[in-house]
Amino acid sequence: MTKTVLITGATSGFGRAAARRFCDEGWNVIGTGRRAERLEELKSELGSKFHGLVFDIADEKATAEALNSLPDTFRPIDVLVNNAGLALGTAPAQETKLQDWHQMIDTNIKGLVTITHHLLPKLIEQKGMIINLASIAAHYPYPGGNVYGGTKAFVHQFSYGLRSDLHGTGVRVTAIEPGMAESEFTLVRTGGSQEASDKLYDGAKPLTPEDIAEQIFWVATLPPHVNINTLEAMPVSQSWAPFQVHRGN
């Protein structure tokens, strides 16, 4: 029987690569995002196995309406990939915009928990799986990471809480926590600065969206008695920084 995966944030980066990976293996794929033209492009590329849903994950009403509009073929959802998320700004907390903090919380936390809550009955019925995209920022702070790191720490802990609550249902829960990966992430974070993006990744051999898509697909296709609680991955070029020490008065 053909399985179905719903991937949020399928218009770029990890989500788009994951949509391609699952479709290549014959899965039905529901891809969500705000950019209709990107979803149309994926539909043209991937064909009838792909169904796009255009809505903002931070809009609870739009989320519910989109999910309720799914055709029968795509309704039995086996895997939810909570990929949609963003970072905004690199300034220290005392200089950042409160609006940026709110937007990260609305998308990375509220949007994620809203769609998860809506789909839990289906996932329990299917003995399915939830894969949440967190980040190494959930564990390793860095200057300018402030609320972004906090939202990903929430995703990490929420994944563990779900795993505990869903005990006995057969539903598996995994948090995938990538390190430096080259996508549109830095462009979004810096307000579209290609220079900043190029500088960050230059010579670093970062992870690629395809690397993360492979991890997502591997986790999703393990035997049903196997649960990967957390999968953390960095490029070889990245490791931990030393502690900061301020020596002023």
Image (tube, helix red, strand yellow):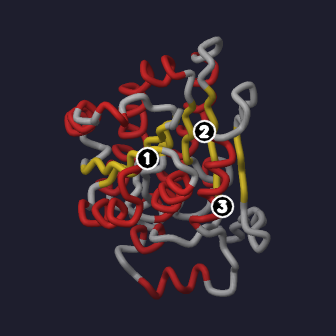
Q: Nearer the viewer, mark 3 or mark 1?
A: 1
Q: In the rendered view, would you say 154 is above or below 134?
A: above
- Crowdedness near tag 3: few (<14), some (14–19) or many (≥20) residues, C-alpha within 10 Å: some
Place of residue 28 in the rendered image (x, y in percent of width and height, measured from the top left): 45, 44
Q: Nearer the viewer, residue 35 or 150?
A: 35
- Crowdedness near tag 1: few (<14), some (14–19) or many (≥20) residues, C-alpha within 10 Å: many
Mark 1: which amino acid? Val
Q: Nearer the viewer, residue 204 or 40?
A: 40
User: Quick one: label 3 or label 1, which is nearer the N terminus?
Assistant: 1
Mark 2: which amino acid? His
Q: Determine whether, in the image, residue 35 is placed left or right of residue 179.
A: left
Could you say which disc has been placed on residue 156 in the image?
2
Place of residue 188 in the rendered image (x, y in percent of width and height, measured from the top left): 39, 69
User: At x 52% / y 63%, what residue is drawn?
Assistant: 144
Secondary structure of residue under mark 3 = loop
Q: Nearer the viewer, mark 1 or mark 2?
A: 1
**Residue annotated with mark 3:** 179
User: At x 48% / y 55%, what residue is drawn?
Assistant: 19
**Residue annotated with mark 1:** 29
From the image, which quarter does the C terminus lie in? bottom right
User: Quick one: label 1 or label 2, which is nearer the N terminus?
Assistant: 1
Instruction: Tell me how far mark 1 sits from mark 2, CA to CA.
Output: 25 Å
